[in-house]
Image (cartoon, rainbow, N blue to C red):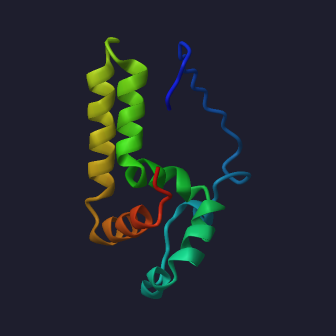
Amino acid sequence: MPCHAERYCFTIWVDAPADKVNTPQETQLRLSPSALDDPDALIEALRLSPLQRSLSRAVYDEEYEESISQCMAGAPGCQEMVQAHRMSVDASRQSAGLRKLIDLLRQHKPHR
């Protein structure tokens, strides 16, 4: 953001054999309680993990919603996309432990 040209979005999912990418060890969040004591180390570990894709929507909640709203303004389905985003973020925040992690990461994100 901002965009000074017409935007298009193309999404494609490419799958590989399950044993080649995103193993359970890579995609299951397993943190000791002390992991939150060193936010910088935790952030670096998540930055290099496939988990960052799962957490980014909740951590960058407002930026995601603003991007959807700007990109889809006036287009059919815009409100539904924003609503789906809200539901995803709300679902992520249902777990007290995950909510604590999201809040910690939000405190350490770069501010614009």
Residue occupying image coordinates x 42% and y 32%: 67
For residue 55, above or below residue 5? below
Q: How many marks?
A: 0
Where residue 48 sits in the image (x, y, percent)? 66, 61
The image position of residue 80, as x and y in percent, is 28, 25
| Above or below for 35 versus 95 | below
10 lies left or right of 85: right
Residue at (40, 61) in percent of width and height? 106
Q: In terms of image quadrants, where is residue 11?
A: top right
Does residue 82 lie above or below 40 as drawn?
above
Q: Position of residue 110 (x, y in %)?
A: 50, 58
At 33% from the left and 72% from the top, the residue drawn is 97
Which residue is located at x 61 percent, y 32 percent?
Answer: 13
Q: Nearer the viewer, residue 67 or 35?
A: 67
Q: Quadrant of residue 52?
A: bottom right
Is 105 located above or below residue 69 in the figure? Answer: below
* Residue furthest out toward the right: 20
Across and down, in percent, residue 104 comes to 40, 70
